[in-house]
Amino acid sequence: MSTDTLAAALERIRAVLVKLAKGVGERDLSFEHPEALIRELADAGFGRLRVPEEFGGFGVELPVLFELLAEAGQADSNVPQIFRGHFTTVEILLLETDAAVRAHWLRKIGGGAVFGNAQSEPSAVVAEAVTAGEVTPGWGASTTTVRTGPDGQRLVSGTKFYSTGARFADYIRAAVADDEGGRGFVVIPARHPGVTHVDDWDGIGQRQTGSGTTLFADVPVEPHGDVGKFKESLRGLDSFVQIVHLANLTGIARSIVAETVDIVRARTRTSLHALTQAAADDPEVLGVVGVLQARRLTAETLLRLAGERLQAAHASGDESEYTRAYLDTSAAQIAVIEAVLDAATRAFDAGGSSTARNSAHLDRHWRNARTLASHNPVVYKPRVVGAYLVNGDSPEPGYYRNRPSAEVSA
């Protein structure tokens, strides 16, 4: 059990976030990964925020976690995404039905261990396997398999993409297919010789998240390595992973406002048609800043609501409350993405043509927000919300698919 306090950890965490913010624009242009600073952030206690105190963490509730992720997103929006797989693993472990597995990994994370993500696979690899009859087609098809070697050791082999955070991690939670074709999560060491991290993420935004290809070649499953085997360990996860993105988008909105204010204050000239010589006195420019602040408040308010809804669902344990949390999170996703993308575009109106230069780094906000909006695509969410309101159609949690219930298996 750690004797560290949350207040002391937050002081250290915020000091690292200041360092991350200082070089964020340059790293975006140079594609430099902030590996040393990510480790420093983990050592400061960032990854322990949700871990119960008995295992060395701080046991913060979800609204607090999401607010701190928004702070991290304001400093560098790559950070919440790098840690998204880590915090998702913590959420699974908090509800883990196997007490020994839960205690083992929460104690590891309470000691500073960081998890990465490896769920999705390259579509071309999956399509080839489906054509060859090696995997069954459908949502979540996995060509990454776990097999038992001659010595009884379970080994993982396969190819993953969008493996966000894996290159920064100590352990990876990998989605695998077992011998019976079932889909589950196993924990493997991120630095094993059989793990290859390929730096091939070519997204327009979120360039430093390490979201490229990861190759597994006979990588051993860790002891207590089966996590989230049953649906009961995955409750609320569909909402959680999206709210992490909402927190990140909220941080981007804050950064847009702060940077635009600095740009306006520093401007020494305005347009020929401006009503004043000083940009800081220009009514149109001030109006742009006011709209940006309104967009920021939209994001902050809906982030807080979504976090509180999910926290309440956990408190009640009622499946209908998890459905409500997911629907409210989906509606919040629609509005937050619209607000932040609009802010990221309007900000240029306050700064003039100089803000279009690479050295201003203002374009990264739109690229990062647009990239985040493309994950768990927002295009489907209005229909999901509408189908429930009109027809009472409850969306099926994606994490429940191909997962048995602990109650049925008991």
Image: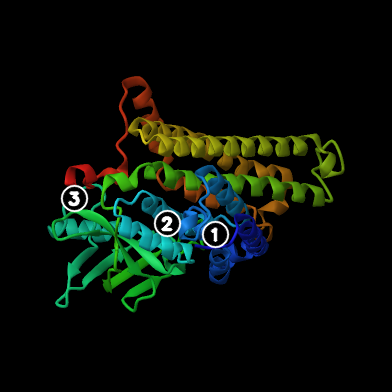
Q: Which residue is mark 1?
A: 46
Amino acid bearing label 3: Pro
Left or right: residue 134 versus residue 247 is left
Mark 1 vs mark 2: in front: 1
Q: In which quadrant of the rendered view does residue 239 lie?
A: top left
Q: Is residue 136 visible?
A: yes
Q: Which residue is mark 2?
A: 85
> Which type of secondary structure does the marked residue at label 1 adopt?
helix
> Which type of secondary structure does the marked residue at label 2 adopt?
helix
Label 2 environment density (alpha carbons within 10 Å; few <14, some 14–19, many ≥20):
many
Q: Which residue is mark 3?
A: 137
**What residue is drawn where x is 43% and y is 45%?**
240
Residue 328 at x, y = what percent? 45, 32
Q: What distance separates the C-alpha of mark 1 from that of mark 3?
A: 39 Å
Closer to the chain start, of discs 3 and 2, is 2
Frontmost residue, 180 versus 97: 97
Closer to the chain start, of discs 1 and 3, is 1
Left or right: residue 44 versus residue 131 is right
Closer to the chain start, of discs 1 and 2, is 1
Q: Are marks 1 and 2 in contact (CB under 8 Å)?
A: no
* Residue with the most extreme top position: 390
**What residue is drawn where x is 63% and y is 63%?**
16
Mark 3 vs mark 2: in front: 2
**What residue is drawn where x is 45% and y is 59%?**
55
